[in-house]
Amino acid sequence: MIVAIVGPTGVGKTKMSIELAKYLNAPIINADAVQIYKELNIGSAKVTEEEKEGIKHYLIDLKSPDEMYTVKDYQEAARKILQDYKDKNIIFCGGTGLYLCAALMDYRFYEDENNANYENYSNEKLYELVLKKDSKTNIDKNNRKRMIRFLNKKLVEIVEPKILYKDVIFIGLTTDRKKLYDIIDKRVDLMIASGLLEEVEKLYKKYPNSHVLNSAIGYKELIGYIKGEYSLEEGIELIKKNSRHYAKRQYTWFNNKMQVKWFNVNYDNFCDTIKEVKEYIDKW
């Protein structure tokens, strides 16, 4: 059985995943794009060793912030783990819907050739574009033909809404919008109190050109503050605002792409929600 725990940011997916992992004797595969990266801990709400309670977790802390990691990379890694745990229970947990689709659905990649004209580009400019596309490239900057061929290739994605595995259950955790936004705001305040700004300052100094740092919510906003674009208070409000907008996009994705069974979280007694989910899985 494959159980995918989905829902908006901050709703309680990590806690649910641990309880279900213990119940089903299953490992957990991370499905959060930012938690793939080492050192991005506070801002990604990365599960701690204490929170793991000894449960095996996969696809966390794989890459340095200055390395690239694609959806195709995730798909290949996740499917290998699924193959290793064939006929056993396994849990996905995370809010990156694209990763879940790539891992579990008929989501294919192929390379398509463009015919862009780079005739008037110098080798130096071509190499600059190559590095922008892949900072870890091994292409020789004097190999003009290979650089142009590389720049003209792009990955094309084909998605069919067909699950490739049997016994896949999508468990969604939700709450009313006002409650969710309050949770998100308090979560951001807790991250700041826990040292998020210090984490971002350290990482930005070390990896100023990191794509994930400059694009991930919680990091990009504080980088704007570090650059002097606005005050710290404005940066924190931006994190809250962008997190709320992201939560809305997550709902849209999950409802459009997956057959999710939604559970309203009882935050006064989370055990009741856990019990509800377990009963649903038992009847599957």
Image: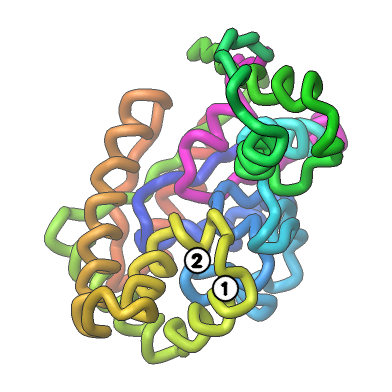
| Residue 272 seen in render | no
- Total numbered labels placed on residues in the image: 2
* Residue at image coords 73%, 64%: 55
Provide the residue designation for mark 2. Answer: 44
Residue 117 percent coordinates (x, y): 57, 14
**Does residue 171 lie above or below 79 as drawn?**
below
Left or right relative to 42: residue 11: left
Provide the residue designation for mark 1. Answer: 41
Give the amino acid type for the residue marked by disc 2 in the picture.
Ser
Image quadrant in which you'd find residue 74: top right
Examine the structure image and report whether residue 165 is included in the region drawn in magenta: no
Residue 203 percent coordinates (x, y): 58, 76
Graded by Cα atoms within 10 Å as few (under 14), some (14 to 19) or many (20 or more), the crowding at tag 2 reads: many
* Residue at image coords 22%, 83%: 231
Indicate the quadrant containing the N terminus: top left, top right, bottom left or bottom right: top right
- In depth, the one of 248 and 12 nearer the eye is 248
Residue 193 percent coordinates (x, y): 38, 91
Q: Secondary structure at mark 2?
A: loop
* Residue at image coords 36%, 84%: 190
**Would you say the residues marked 1 and 2 are in contact, meaning their CB atoms lie under 8 Å apart?**
yes
What colouring style does the render use? rainbow
- In depth, the one of 196 and 154 nearer the eye is 154
User: Residues in magenta?
Assistant: 82-110
Image quadrant in which you'd find residue 112: top right
* Residue at image coords 37%, 63%: 10
**Does residue 11 lie above or below 195 as drawn?**
above
Left or right relative to 220: residue 244: left
Give the amino acid type for the residue marked by disc 1 in the picture.
Asn
